[in-house]
Amino acid sequence: MKAAIFEKVKEPLKLDDNYPNPNISSELGHAIIEIEACGVCHTDFGYLEHGVPTVKQPPLILGHEISGRIKKVNEDVITFKEGDHVIIPAVLSCGYCVNCRTGRENICSNQIMLGNHIDGGFAEQIKVPIKDVVHLPPELSLEESCIISDAISTPYHAVKNRGQVRPGDWVVVIGCGGIGLNVVQNVKAAGGLAIAIDIVPQKLEVAKQLGAVETILAKDKDEREIVGMIRKLTGGGADIAFEAIGNPATMKQAFNSLRTGGRLIAVGYSPKRWDGFDIGRVMFREMEVMGSLGCRPVDYPHIIELVKHGSLQVKPLITHKFPLSEINEAFDVMRQGEGIRIIILCQK
């Protein structure tokens, strides 16, 4: 099969037309998926450009936002058949650790991430456990639905399960990339009032299209000015703030934008420490600070229904499509800071 292989940091992915096909003949409970599309995520860019280590050492197939068709299943599989449209969650859970048994599969102690622990989706086919595969209604675009696997689902978990956004809540969203924009539209779906913040005007325009009630162009503004604007808009501070960049400076800004009793959700990842964190304020004002990682498998059917009925949009987020043979050009677009979400068409 065709595949794009990650071999070394800061080097183009190697295109291989003869990568070994996956085989399920000796295993039960598995499926081979013919990959239609795979989203290009900043996580992939981190491995390729910044040397973030993968669990499986290269050579490795990156990519974890996968949609496709069932090509083959084991004889014990009765819930899927050849040709079914599916998506695959970015992270596969074990199902039996303490976190899985208590409904927190997204932080499974034995989790396996596609394109990190094992080969991922920048290829024509992939083998996965059938328990992790999710049905996709035929009326949804198979290509575009690949981003449900992570770009849509991760913000859904952040908003619903961690942020617990309620109708009428004032919600700050800092960073309007793929994740932040989906936080915005999930906030709208939950009935919250989103204030979107970014340094790129075009991204703020998309945020408005997806439901932001207010936007703040942060370019050339310092933290005090931005926090002051938020406090004025919300009558004293936001109820909840989502930081979707992964930067200690914007994390601090998000925290300072909250009212007494507010809740900060860290969705963006950063390896840097947050110096000067005011734990006294957390205690005295009953603030909440929490992280959010991925999405629980149980939430995917609800997310798909929201997409199916238009409460969550996919198409406006996808700005570029490339065939698998042009995957390195796709990463160039990301490298230049262009676009919102890029997808790779793996059968072209």
Image: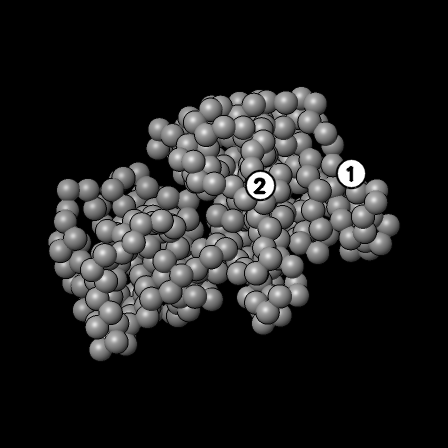
Type of residue at label 1?
A: Asn
Q: Is residue 99 left or right of residue 258?
A: right
Height in image: 296 above or below 284? Answer: above
The number of discs equals 2
Few, some or many C-alpha atoms within 10 Å of disc 1 (few <14, some 14-19, many ≥20)?
few
Few, some or many C-alpha atoms within 10 Å of disc 2 (few <14, some 14-19, many ≥20)?
few
The residue located at (53%, 26%) in the rendering is: 13
Coloured how?
A: one colour
Q: Which residue is mark 1?
A: 23
Q: Is residue 170 left or right of residue 154?
A: left
Which comes before the other along the chain, label 1 or label 2?
Answer: 1
The quarter of the picture where residue 243 lies is bottom left
Height in image: 262 above or below 23? Answer: below
Type of residue at label 2?
A: Lys
Q: Is residue 308 left or right of residue 286?
A: right
Q: Quadrant of the N terminus?
A: top right
Q: Which residue is mark 2?
A: 56
The residue located at (70%, 23%) in the rendering is: 18
Q: Position of residue 158 (x, y in %)?
A: 44, 60
Kindly identify which numbered label has been placed on residue 92.
none
The residue located at (36%, 58%) in the rendering is: 266
Q: Residue furthest right?
A: 75
Q: Position of residue 209 (x, y in %)?
A: 37, 47
